[in-house]
Amino acid sequence: MHESMHKKQPQNLEQIVSLAKRRGFIYQSSEIYGGISGMWDYGPYGMTLKENIKRLWWSRFVEQREDMYGLDAAVIMHPKVWEASGHVEGFADPLVECQKCKRQFRADQTDEVCSECGGKLGNAEPFNMMFATHVGARADSSSLAYLRPETAQGIFVNFKNIIDSFHPKLPFGIAQMGKAFRNEIAPRDFLFRAREFEQMEAEYFVRPENWEERFTLWRETMEKFLHDDLGLARDRVHALEVPERDRAHYSRRTIDFEFDYPFGAKELCGLAYRTDYDLTRHAALSGADLTFLDQDSGKRLIPHVIEPSFGVDRLVLAVLTSAYREDEMDGERRVYLALSPEVAPIRAAVFPLLKNKPELVARAREIYRVLRKDIPRVAFDDNGNIGKRYRRQDEIGTPWCVTVDFDTLADDTVTIRDRDTGTQERTAVGEIRRRL
Ligand code: GAP
């Protein structure tokens, strides 16, 4: 991707939040009521950007492979799932309360005195982050259920269904994308720590002796996805070996991929070796036979698991941060998003040079109608003058603008403008498709 020294990286998160709101990517949830902490709504461009990220993930992690099965499990599962997984017992952050103003904080993110009023903080108590709800009309302990805090468990509880329906051989995996919910004590940093978010996870089942080899292969796949598919700058992503004391209870090895967000290097996604922890626990609590007959060895075993896990919203924020640029064009300060064509909400926009010339508008509409049949996410735009349209498309990251002018009517050529350089090239109408 075209880079140069005068193109600035974002100084702070506010620039991204402001662009995201102004241009219809991401809004605060329930904003007209003052918002609700930790929840975000995706507008037209944001939801398309997010869908593009999910589509690229699904393509690389499921569709382009023969050893992966897709799944879309329910958000609310049997409460015993969360007993077996360890979430009922241990999915807690330490909570402290100010004895003076009663504000609550995460104990590991605050000092000894309240950052709001200077009051003394009480003792840290574990706070379980699962959102509880009730299933059915009776609201008592018999109907208690949880919104899933990770998509992974939907996969483990369907392990037997998938092997009974599809008879896969080891190694194979099951993948799912979907919402997850965590009642975070301190949601912060825009999409980074939310209470409702999306995950894309794969559980890959292997023979125990093969875990290291498969771990390495999944690490490579994750890196390809982050850099080749999403276009994240290589020097902004760092792989971090997580020491034993910081690993989740189920993990014998974890690599976190951190991204340099405007608020610091923070976890983007992770790769964990979950051993046979989950299947063994579910087998014990449910009584189901979750062993697998390995046809090659003739032995029954509980497979071990490698788990690549992504938070979609953290990827959205990383993609926006990585793509954000400021420069000067035609003597004016410009903000643009250097998104790849695969990720950009609009791949190409078609304009008539002037919107009050019916013959230009008609020809531009014709070209737009033909292009949209073959090219994904083509838009038509005749709002405001041409300079404003370029700026708007730059800000939402549209890689190409196709402009229909008077020459088009004479010789059937258009200009194609490149977002990053602003250069325009005349191209025959029949050639546009090949260029985008
Ligand atoms: N199944 C493993 C698991 O859930 P995790 O590290 O707790 O592991 C996986 O979460 C990913 O989900 C994280 O790497 C992150 O991208 C995303 N994630 C976790 N909590 C989040 C939150 N509060 N807001 C946004 N994304 C979150």
Image (cartoon, grey):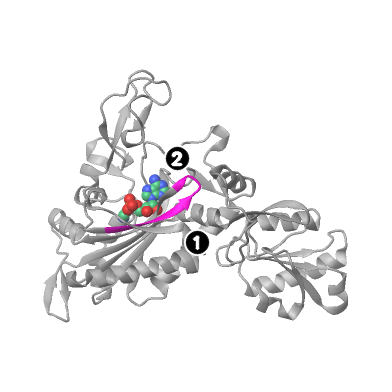
Residue at (68% x, 54% y) in the render? 327
Q: Position of residue 335 (x, y in %)?
A: 66, 52
Q: Residues within 10 Å of mark 2 (few under 14, many from 20)?
A: few
Range shown magenta: 254-264
Instruction: Give left or right: position of 392 versus 121.
Output: right
- Rendered view: 217 above or below 182: below
Give the Cα separation between the discs numbered 1 and 2: 22 Å
Would you say residue 257 sits in the magenta stretch?
yes
The reply to whether the C-beta atoms of the residues labelled 1 and 2 are less than 8 Å apart is no
Q: Earlier in the sequence, mark 1 or mark 2?
A: 2
On the question of residue 333 being in view, the answer is: yes
Give the amino acid at mark 2: Arg
Mark 2 lies on a secondary structure that is loop
In the image, which is nearer the foreground, mark 1 or mark 2? 1
The answer to which of 236 and 368 lies nearer the viewer is: 236
Determine which quarter of the picture holds residue 57. Answer: bottom left
Where residue 164 appears, as percent x and y from the top left, is 23, 71
| Disc on res. 148 | none
What residue is at 81 percent from the left and 70 percent from the top? Answer: 363
- Residue 230 place in picture, x, y as percent: 50, 64
From this view, report whether residue 65 is shown above or below residue 278.
below
Q: Which residue is denoted by mark 2 in the rendering?
A: 188
As for residue 41 lying within the magenta part, the answer is no
